[in-house]
Image (spheres, helix red, strand yellow):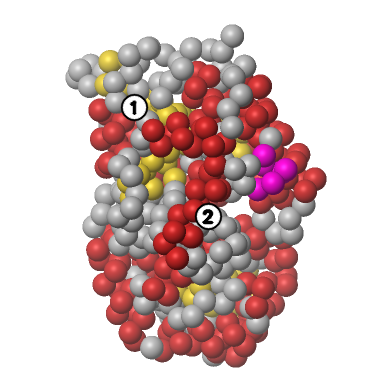
């Protein structure tokens, strides 16, 4: 730990952002706020997302492996095994870095062991509310309907206490601790340690979207969104600007990281749906360029700029994309694919800003066309979306995290190296 000239605390903060683009982007906004508070911020992420970090003016630390084959599309045991082995090794190497505090995304939970090996504190900075509650079933499970308050809590707690995902995940913590020279610890013991010490976890989602469950212990806070930064020097493509203003307001259709695997298939489905609905569309499905006079395919475009200019957004319900749609104040069409996405789809419906969700496996041009038409033509969806946007946009989700880091007193100096 070093001191700033003004007497304030300056800490070396390392954020571990394991996962795909949506798992990393919010930490750029959070990291920027921590940097503005005088802290030195580094984000560890996979190499495809290095520019997200460096464009925000933050230091970047590479993680090995490519999460896309392991975490999206058709699940492959061999791809997951290879990825997990690379991840364990990459996180273990992070223990050789110097840091005063580790901030851990949910997918970077193995970083808890890294912090222990380094001898430094850690906090959770989660993008999904995964801790046990009776209010809803486990966010990352196959359960999409409530199991009752007791059942919801028990199912979520089992996910923490047991080698929950079977042999694929059961050994990761064991391997991580062995690699770091730490004594063995069962998942149940780890969970109980976190609970007994009230390990702090901040959730980067609006409490208006997910109200804080009353049965959550102190230290599990829902702060508000951490908005990603736009790439440095970004300007909209003139072709996109012209398309947005050359006719009726278009809608958006995108499927996140999944789109790259079957770009042509998803694009064909979306174009068919837009034709049936008689709507103009901006597609983010892996292709680029004019597909017709009424359909433009684009690459990466900041959602905070694009979404407010559209009539509705149809998306896969990743947490970040869901938040961007809420912030934009436009109706949504929820097309959840996997993991936490059905949970966010259910929240959009409960908030009244989206019609009934279409599970991706049941998506057809006709169903997408019907949902888009409903979202665009029923004014109630837009009115509710606009009212929610005003309130969400007024929140400062980063402030509680910055305050917690500012108040943290590190008494042991820079992180030690295992040995």
Relative image position of residue 249 (x, y in whole percent) = 43, 80
**Where does label 1 land, which residue?**
39
Please name the residue shown 53% across and 12% down the image.
417
Q: Is residue 207 above or below residue 191?
A: below
Q: Quadrant of residue 75?
A: bottom right
Please name the residue shown 25% across and 63% down the image.
391
Please name the residue shown 62% across and 46% down the image.
164
Q: Secondary structure at mark 1?
A: loop
Relative image position of residue 406 (x, y in whole percent) = 27, 29
Q: Nearer the viewer, residue 352 or 28?
A: 352
Side of 36 where 71 appears, left or right: right
First along the sequence among labels 2 and 1: 1
Which contiguous range is marked in magenta? 165-170
Asked if the stretch drawn in magenta spans residue 194, the answer is no
- Measure the alpha-carbon separation of dots 2 and 1: 38 Å
Q: Is residue 398 above or below residue 224?
A: above
Side of 38 where 153 appears, left or right: right
Residue lying farthest to the left in this orientation? 6
| Picture quarter with the N terminus | top left
**Where does label 2 land, which residue?**
155
Please name the residue shown 65% across and 60% down the image.
258
């Amino acid at each position: 730990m070093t001191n700033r000239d003004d007497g304030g605390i300056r800490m070396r903060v390392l954020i571990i952002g394991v996962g795909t683009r949506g798992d990393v982007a919010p930490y750029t906004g959070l990291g920027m706020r921590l940097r503005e508070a005088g802290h030195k911020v580094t984000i560890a992420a996979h190499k495809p997302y290095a520019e997200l970090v460096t464009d925000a003016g933050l230091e970047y630390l590479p993680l090995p492996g490519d999460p896309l084959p392991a975490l999206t599309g058709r699940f492959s045991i061999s791809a997951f095994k290879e990825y997990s082995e690379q991840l364990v090794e990459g996180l273990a190497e992070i223990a050789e870095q110097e840091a005063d505090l580790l901030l851990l995304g949910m997918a970077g939970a193995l970083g808890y062991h890294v912090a222990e090996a380094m001898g430094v504190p850690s906090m959770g900075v989660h993008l999904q509310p995964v801790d046990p509650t009776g209010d809803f079933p486990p966010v990352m499970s196959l359960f999409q309907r409530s199991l009752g308050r007791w059942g919801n809590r028990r199912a979520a707690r089992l996910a923490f206490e047991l080698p929950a995902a079977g042999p694929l995940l059961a050994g990761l913590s064991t391997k991580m601790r062995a690699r770091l020279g730490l004594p063995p610890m069962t998942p149940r013991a780890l969970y109980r340690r976190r609970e007994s010490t009230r390990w702090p976890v901040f959730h980067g989602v609006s409490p208006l979207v997910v109200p804080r469950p009353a049965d959550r212990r102190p230290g599990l806070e829902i702060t508000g969104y951490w908005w990603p930064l736009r790439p440095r020097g970004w300007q909209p493509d003139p072709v996109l600007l012209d398309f947005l203003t050359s006719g009726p307001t278009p809608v958006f259709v995108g499927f996140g990281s999944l789109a790259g695997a079957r770009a042509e298939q998803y694009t064909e489905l979306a174009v068919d749906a837009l034709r049936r609905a008689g709507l103009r569309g901006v597609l983010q499905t892996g292709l680029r360029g004019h597909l017709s006079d009424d359909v433009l395919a684009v690459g990466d475009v900041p959602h905070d700029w694009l979404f407010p200019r559209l009539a509705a957004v149809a998306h896969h319900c990743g947490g970040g994309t869901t938040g961007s749609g809420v912030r934009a104040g436009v109706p949504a069409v929820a097309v959840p694919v996997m993991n936490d996405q059905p949970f966010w789809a259910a929240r959009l419906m409960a908030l009244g800003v989206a019609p009934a969700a279409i599970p991706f496996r049941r998506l057809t041009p006709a169903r997408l066309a019907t949902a888009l038409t409903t979202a665009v033509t029923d004014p109630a969806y837009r009115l509710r979306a606009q009212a929610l946007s005003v309130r969400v946009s007024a929140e400062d989700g980063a402030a509680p995290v910055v305050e917690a880091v500012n108040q943290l007193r590190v008494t042991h100096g820079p992180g030690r190296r295992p040995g």
